[in-house]
Amino acid sequence: MNPFLCLLALPGSSKHRCYSIGYGNRSLDEFLKMLLNNGITDLVDIRRYPQSTFEDFNRESLEKVLPKNGIRYVHCENVGGMRDSAYIEYMNTDEFRGGFEKLMDLIVKVNETGGRIVLMCAEKSPKGCHRHYLSNKLEENSIEVIHLVEPGQMSLFKFCE
């Protein structure tokens, strides 16, 4: 068994929930279909720099296309990766804590209004992304994180420290 994985808690084990997705090499159509099939109402871009080699996933493009599909776009730079130090070290900074608090507030607000929120980054798999560490932190704060991996498939695991 992979030491970084353990079984996901049963649904309903936490009050609030968020999803996680990476666009990887997906087309914009495939990406949108995954969001819509999972009832996503709010997307939080957790990339420090919201630009991509795939123009469809640049901030400016997402700010236009997501609302046309009933999805609100929010950029949350302070929880983004690509830091001078290791991400796990960055998580101990005031900058991260402030961004994390805002993210937590947004997740709770979206959940309490009946919406579904997803955290988006570039890497398709959360295992190779800072979403791994962010997911742990959210789960420590009673937020269930469901990773959208492939169309029709959600992760059956969560990350453990």
Image (cartoon, rainbow, N blue to C red):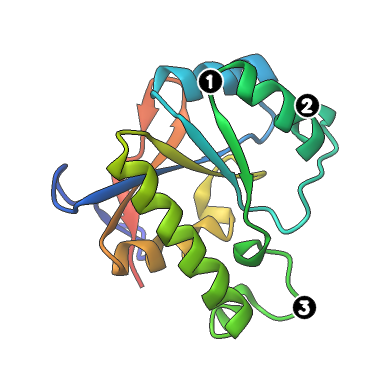
Residue at 81 percent across and 34 percent down: it is 60
Q: Which mark is residue 84?
A: 3
Residue 154 coordinates in the image, percent (x, y)? 36, 33
Q: Can the viewer see residue 68 in this picture?
A: yes
- Spatial CA distance of label 3 from label 1 is 36 Å
| Left or right side of 12 for 140 | right
Is residue 27 visible to the viewer in this orientation of the structure?
Answer: no
**What amino acid is labelled 3 in the image?**
Asp
Quick check: 85 left or right of 73?
right
Q: Nearer the viewer, residue 70 or 91?
A: 70
Q: Which numbered tag is attached to residue 70?
A: 1
Mark 3: secondary structure: loop
Asked whether 41 or 50 is in front, the reply is 41
Q: Position of residue 33 (x, y in %)?
A: 53, 16
Give the structural element (helix, strand or loop) at label 2: helix
The C terminus: image quadrant? bottom left
Tell me how far mark 2 sits from mark 3, CA to CA: 27 Å
Please state which amino acid type lies under the numbered disc 1: Gly
State which quadrant residue 146 falls in: top left
Q: Which one is in front in this view, the residue at disc 2 or the one at disc 3? A: 2
- Residue 41 horizontal/vertical position (percent): 46, 30
- Label 1 sits on a secondary structure element that is loop
Q: Which mark is in front, 2 or 1?
A: 1
The image shows residue 78 at horizontal and vertical percentages of 64, 66
**CA distance separating discs 2 and 1:** 17 Å
Mark 2 — residue? 56
Q: Earlier in the sequence, mark 2 or mark 1?
A: 2
